[in-house]
Amino acid sequence: MPYPNQQEALASLQFFRNSAIISLAAMRLIDSQAILDLHGLAAYCSPTELSFIPKAECGVAGSTYIDFSQIVKSYIDDREALRENLRQYWNSARRNLIKEAFEITKAYAEVNSLTGQIKQQPWFQFARMIRNSLSHDLHLRFRNSDLPLLPVSWQGKTITASMNEHPLPSDLLDPYATWALFEHIYSFVDSHPGA
């Protein structure tokens, strides 16, 4: 996925930002009475279509239906379980945002001979190690080549060698840090025109 063109790289980064914003909006709506609007609906999935229909209309061969009643029931009967599901959903959204943004920006830098410049960014090594953790079961695992770089700090957050083989601490990539890290990554592409 090389991104030689700055505008293409920025458009891809904006796509992932928008996806994360949609995820946050969905989380807000799901944890509100708006979820009740899904009562009796299902997602209809076929090879050519994704739509939302009344559950009573489900039953076409070669299609799949995803019933929303479970999530509506969780809102009504077990709000804490619903919120735990939303926390896991946020983990997925932030994983997608940071992992993809890092990969796009790294590829953009490589194709445009900006590797030296990107590696000098104060967020780069922090983001690289976070990206690795997000991609590999939310644990910090360091290669031998990582160890001399540690500790790595960014905006008051520090990754140390003692964190090796441990779960990613939630405060290391809290919601604020997630957005701030994305904005730093985005700003690199925005401020470094390609060759």
Image: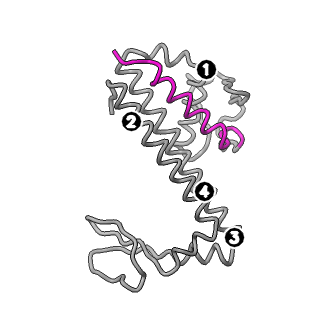
The amino acid type found where label 4 is placed reads Gln
Q: How many marks?
A: 4
Q: In the visual, does 164 lie left or right of 40?
A: right
Q: Quick one: label 1 or label 3, which is nearer the N terminus?
A: 3
- What's the amino acid at mark 2? Ala
Q: Of the numbered discs in the image, which one, if any, rests on residue 11?
A: 2
Which of the labelled discs sits on residue 122, or is there none? 1
N-term mark: 2 or 1: 2
Q: Nearer the viewer, residue 99 or 57?
A: 57
Quarter placement of the N terminus:
top left
For marks 2 and 1, give the one nearer the viewer.
2
Q: Is 91 on the left-hand or right-hand side of 110?
A: right
Residue underneath mark 3:
79
Residue of label 4: 88
Report the span colored magenta.
Answer: 171-195
Secondary element type, mark 1:
loop
